[in-house]
Image (cartoon, rainbow, N blue to C red):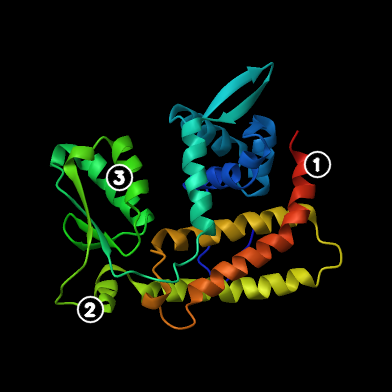
Amino acid sequence: MIDSPTLQPIQDKKSNSKFMLLVLFGEYIQGRGSKIWLSDLLALLDLLGIGEHTGRSTVNRMAREGWFTVTKDGRNSKLELTKHGETILQGGTLRVNETPPAQWNGDWHMVTYSLPEQQRKQRNNLRKQLSWLGYGSLGPGFWISPNNQHPELKAVLKNLDVEKAVHLFSGQYDGPLTPQEIVDLCWDLAELTREYQAFNRFYEQDMAAFKQENQPDPAEAFVKRFMLTVRLFPILQKDPNLPLSMLPDEWPGTIGRDLFSEYRKLLTPYVDQFLDQTIR
């Protein structure tokens, strides 16, 4: 398992087992028919440091939550992603591959809502989804983004059953703050910069070392590519993907995304070889 003083290690694999399962399905299984034998999945999880007991309990919990169906075949079981699971994982794939818009037309896209305490769970889920879509909080119940994510948000609102409590607006802002002051209020670019820089330092060195290997181990390449995604994804969750005009020069997020793509491409042939031998 990858570890480094420049990156925060995953402290509790058990509590992150659901996230790691989602990465497995989104990165590897979805592209191979969205099906996998439970025994094969448990073998992959074991390679990633998650034991059989934790793996089985996580699978059972996620099946109850509607992520995939389980079909028995003798003593073994086959897992298959549901349409719900596929849709959410496709959104994650799009987020990994997105790039900052080159231009901004000056419009802000705004979200306002007021949900009572009885709907606290929906309210908390809405905040998480707004953050995931790149909106920033300008005040209580008031979120904004320079990118028009309203079409994606409407699907979220329908799923949360809060469509009538949430209002969407798009238009110009007349002050008193400058666009950059709004950015500073809504998003912590300084913290994002530090996280991207740590990611970049580690993986520039890791990729250079991998290039020096004469015969890379396919299983090791699988773990490396898996962890590459696991390390980047929490940063992407905080990154609003602002237009380039709102970002500092030599934005480390751009460097990080390019590094991710290059290293991922380098590892992929070895990972495919490993999966061809491992997944039936």
Q: Nearer the viewer, mark 3 or mark 2?
A: 2
Q: Secondary structure at mark 1?
A: helix
In the rendered image, residue 270, in percent from the top left (x then y), is placed at 78, 55
Mark 2 or 1, which is nearer the eye? Answer: 2
Q: Amino acid at mark 2?
A: Thr
Q: Which mark is residue 158?
A: none
Q: Quadrant of the C terminus?
A: top right
Lower position in the chain sequence, tag 2 or tag 1: 2
Circle on res. 125: 3
Q: Nearer the viewer, residue 4 or 244?
A: 244
Mark 2 closeness class: few <14, some 14–19, many ≥20 residues within 10 Å: few
| Camera sees residue 67 | no
- Label 1, residues with CA under 10 Å away: few <14, some 14-19, many ≥20: few
Residue where numbered disc 1 is placed: 277
User: Dot 3 surroundings within 10 Å: few (below 14), some, or many (20 or more)?
Assistant: some
Q: Are marks 2 and 1 in contact (CB under 8 Å)?
A: no
Q: Nearer the viewer, residue 6 or 183?
A: 183
Q: Which residue is mark 2?
A: 178
Check disc 1 and give the amino acid type.
Gln
Quick one: label 3 or label 2, which is nearer the N terminus? 3
Image quadrant in which you'd find residue 66: top left
Tell me: residue 252, above or below residue 62. below
| SS label for mark 3 | helix
Secondary structure at badge 2 equals loop
